[in-house]
Image: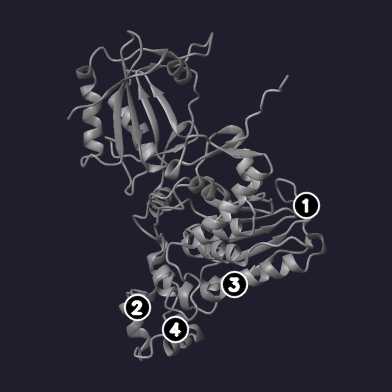
Amino acid sequence: MSIRTINIPYAQRVKLLTSDEGHFLDFKSIDVSPAKLTRHICAFANADGGELYIGIDESNKLNGIRQWRGFKTIEDANGFLQIFEKLFPLGQDFCYEFLSSSKDGLVLHIEIQKTLEVKYTSDNKAYIRRGAQSLPVDGEEALNRLKRNKGVSSFESEIISSSDILHITKSQPLIDFLTEVVPSATDPEIWLRKQLLIRNSKPTVGGLLLFCEEPQVVLPKHCGIKIYRYMTNAPTGTREALSFNPITIEGHIYSQIKTAVSKTVEVIENTPKLDGIRYPHETLHEIITNAVLHRDYGIADDIHVRIFDDRIEIQSPGTLPGHVTVNNILNERFARNGALVRIINKFPDPPNKDIGEGINTAFSAMRNWRLKEPKIEQRDNSVIIFIRHESLGSPEEILLRYLDKSSPIKKSEARRICHVESDNKMTTILQRLVRDGQIERVPDLKGNKSAYRKLLEQPNGD
């Protein structure tokens, strides 16, 4: 297989040598041992992916700049390439190239993707990237958590040996479900076994979450929702800023979602300090639903909904599942708890009507309200979505800010950045800005190539 070599300019070389190692970036000397190298490769693959450069020495303590000391020839890197072929035998989840700069040799640049399966080193150990470190995954619980995050396994399928199938076979939620949705399923236990919600005559976590009237009794601290109201816009909430004792939402997850959304709306609407501050119902519904259906139920923590003066934070236990990352979450789909997602969609008026589109709907609703999109942040063992009450600005303001930095712009691109769905409405906006003397059509660009730019200042006449 031919590997391309790219000759990078001096400015890019300097930028690379002065970059800091971090969660997504690491540098290694050509003297690194294969065993140590696999540790870092696996750490990236087991976390969120990243970039690895082989052929750049550690920084000099005096000037803080790394040294470019690459391979003399491509063949000299064969030992490292063989490592990648062993770790990624199908040639997926990574790509590499050689970088050339002056006469200091070739640097091997590898881009590693987040993998679906857990990757192990040559001595059968798992590592994960945390900040600028590749840390070992020690202990069975830590490894199981990593597998759940990868989607290799799910806690929803675990058997709860301390529970009895009567917790779900005779429950009112199951009776209501089978009566309204699946009338042909006359025997609850047979139906539950068919759905693998009962195994070895014991209920699974998924079965309890879906149909036990109070699964929190059997799974304490694993499946509750807490709602807080902090009378502040500080970065973090404190006990002193709490408006009331946290509200605890329990019950099976179908009722839990509906109750949590309605209670969150109620707290916002009944707080004088928040008078006039509203959030799209679709945004709250979809993000809370997403948190309930996709959280890691193996982590002993609740979902936390924190209502501040200027924002709402929704924190869900567990990192993003499978190959989903903060950057691709609007385009990728992966269900950590497949049974929950599938079966709850069979309920009357299901909370997840549009499968896989919940987060997109939440973002779209914020834009339609002219509010900034939510921000997603992943931490070591949780994901937090920040819903801020910050104005997106008018389409005119957004377009003019864009043209201050980049020009020209076509109408189709203007519609995208201004979140304007109607072509006619965008035409009206552009014409109004032209009429007001703020933008102009680019001369000589006609038809499909038509574009607009900030109005150029005209020289003063004599």
**In front of the other: 48 or 327:** 327
Residue lying at 22% horizontally and 36% vertically, measured from the top left: 86
Relative height, residue 316 to residue 125 (above, below) = below
Disc 2 versus disc 1: distance between alpha carbons? Answer: 50 Å
Disc 3 versus disc 2: distance between alpha carbons? Answer: 25 Å
User: Neighbour class for label 2 at 10 Å: few (<14), some, many (≥20)?
Assistant: some
Q: Nearer the viewer, mark 2 or mark 1?
A: 1
Which residue type does callout 2 highlight? Ser
In the rendered structure, are the residues bearing label 4 and label 1 in contact, judged by CB atoms less than 8 Å apart?
Answer: no
User: Neighbour class for label 4 at 10 Å: few (<14), some, many (≥20)?
Assistant: few
Q: Determine which quarter of the picture holds residue 45.
A: top left
Q: Determine which quarter of the picture holds residue 54.
A: top left
In the rendered structure, are the residues bearing label 2 and label 1 in contact, judged by CB atoms less than 8 Å apart?
Answer: no
User: Neighbour class for label 3 at 10 Å: few (<14), some, many (≥20)?
Assistant: many
The first of marks 3 and 4 along the sequence is 4
Q: Is residue 78 left or right of residue 436?
A: left
The first of marks 4 and 1 along the sequence is 4
In the rendered structure, are the residues bearing label 3 and label 4 in contact, judged by CB atoms less than 8 Å apart?
Answer: no
Q: Secondary structure at mark 3?
A: loop
Name the mark on residue 146.
none
**Quarter of the image containing the C terminus?**
top right
Residue holding disc 1 = 232
Name the mark on residue 201.
2
Residue holding disc 4 = 166
